[in-house]
Image (cartoon, rainbow, N blue to C red):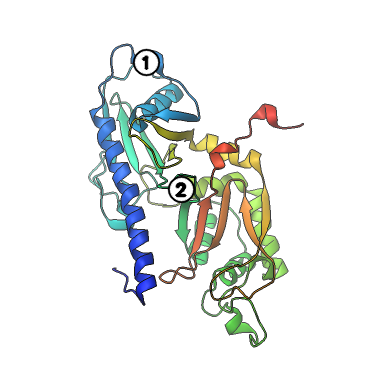
Amino acid sequence: MALIPENEAHKLQIVAGTLGRNRGHQFEKDLASAISSTVWEENDFNRFTKSHRVIGNPAVETIKYIANDLGITEVKELRAWWLGGLATSGLGDALNMTNSERIKRSKTDVLININNQFVKGISVKTCSKKTPTNDQLYFTTASAFSRLLRSNNIPFSNDAENAMKMFCGDNGYRPIDMIDISKRLSDPERWFFEELPQKGRSDIIGTLKNYQKQVSRVLLQLAYPEDPHPPDYILHLTVKPNHVDLSDLALFTVDELIEFSCRYAGFLTKKYKIHKGRFKHDTLPHYAPRFGFIQFQRGGQKQHPTQLQFNLQAGYFNKLVYPEDVLL
């Protein structure tokens, strides 16, 4: 459903968001097309490497990485489908190649078939800035997130769900619904993480600490329960490229990225203050929750104010911790 702008500033926000999505979708479509049209020479398999950071052509470097991971020494046939627009705009190659069902949405942005044998999904992250930015990982509601965790056998208590609703500012769970806000300097339409009830906050922290790998996998790979082709790999365009064949790329299997994220950090909070907007007079410190490379926040946008937004931290690919870096 098209959004109706409330004012000129809101209109510009909607346009910016749409342009950003369109740029990302175009990159995904171009990647799928380039993968399908790539012709591999007989000796190309000698160039297959597995480095998490490379500079080069996205299609070529992606296939080299995946071929190395799968132990493929010769690429005879390649085909790719673009699925990235299905969840957000209904655009993409929606026909499931394994049966007659149509794919409605998928965490996979580009689906590939190598040598008519290996069918693998790629989650594509893009950046249109000269420096790395946060990358949106998943956008949902507090209740939907709670159900998603439970459906994947990850415990999430009712207290935790209610606390997450307070964090997001769901109707009935806002300060304006629960207390006298006449002396409140902070946003009256949501609670900050440090303000949540102790039991609910402790339960959230407990789940994210004790099930960090499982929660990370859900967000990276299993967010759509009906997804027939969840992603196996992550391709991240780290910054805006200067040239199509000289893109700065980060490449991981989903398993590798989860492992790196968990080695980097467990659950923690980062202190911050509000410096702009309607509540810039709020002088209280607040605490942003995060675990590993993943951080989450209340969406706060005018069109989706109570959504729960998960992001990969800006520049996470520059913070990889290898086993030999870990002090035992």
Question: Residue at horizontal 50%, vertical 59%?
Answer: 309
Q: Which residue is mark 1?
A: 45
Vertical placement of residue 272 versus 184, above or below: above
Vertical placement of residue 248 versus 143, above or below: above
Asked whether, in this view, residue 114 is left or right of residue 157, the answer is left
Q: Residues within 10 Å of mark 2 (few under 14, many from 20)?
A: many
Q: Quadrant of the C terminus?
A: top right
| Amino acid type, callout 1 | Phe
Query: Which quadrant of the figure has residue 29?
Result: top left
Question: Residue at horizontal 32%, vertical 49%?
Answer: 23
Q: Secondary structure at mark 2?
A: loop
In terms of sequence position, does the residue under pointer 2 or pointer 1 come before the other? 1
Q: Position of residue 241 (x, y in %)?
A: 38, 38
| Amino acid type, callout 2 | Leu
Q: Which residue is mark 2?
A: 222
- Disc 2 versus disc 1: nearer the observer: 1
